Image: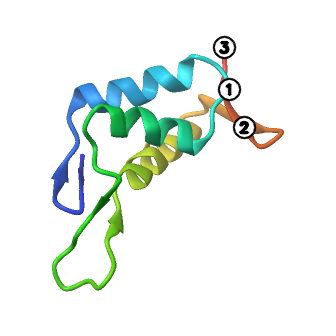
Amino acid sequence: MVIHGITITPEQIAAGLERMKQGEFTTRDIEKTLINLGVPEKVEVEGKILPKECANRVADRLLQRERKAGNLVFKNKVWRWKA
């Protein structure tokens, strides 16, 4: 996966998915996991005035993918992995 020119490794993606499977979580929880593994929170993009979100974008893509696959439910403002 490449976000704003930054390559996200399979290990970083796997860690984000593993965090989802640990229990209730928010998008920010996934972001923090990714940031701790070296995914930048924001990146400067050539031609853009403001930095662009990177870790948030990765977390959102993972959430979208797993939700569409039927692995997640959203209830009481938190996500949960379906058992």
Q: Is residue 68 visible?
A: no
The residue lying at 55 percent from left, 19 percent from top is 21
Residue 6, image x, y percentages: 18, 53
The residue lying at 25 percent from left, 25 percent from top is 11
Kind of residue at disc 3: Ala
Kind of residue at disc 1: Glu
Looking at the image, is 16 positioned above or below residue 44? above
- Choose mark 1 or mark 3, whichever is in front: 1
Q: Tell me which numbered mark, 1 or 2, is placed earlier along the sequence.
A: 1
Cα distance in 3D space between marks 1 and 3: 12 Å
Residue 56, image x, y percentages: 44, 52
Residue denoted by label 2: 78
Residue 58, image x, y percentages: 38, 48
Residue 9 in which image quadrant? top left
- Choose mark 2 or mark 3, whichever is in front: 2
Q: Is residue 69 left or right of residue 47?
A: right
Cα distance in 3D space between marks 2 and 3: 15 Å
Tags 1 and 2 in contact by the CB under 8 Å rule? yes
Q: Is residue 20 left or right of residue 54?
A: right
Q: Tell me which numbered mark, 1 or 3, is placed earlier along the sequence.
A: 1
Residue denoted by label 3: 83
Kind of residue at disc 2: Val
Tags 2 and 3 in contact by the CB under 8 Å rule? no
Residue denoted by label 1: 24
Residue 39 in which image quadrant? top left
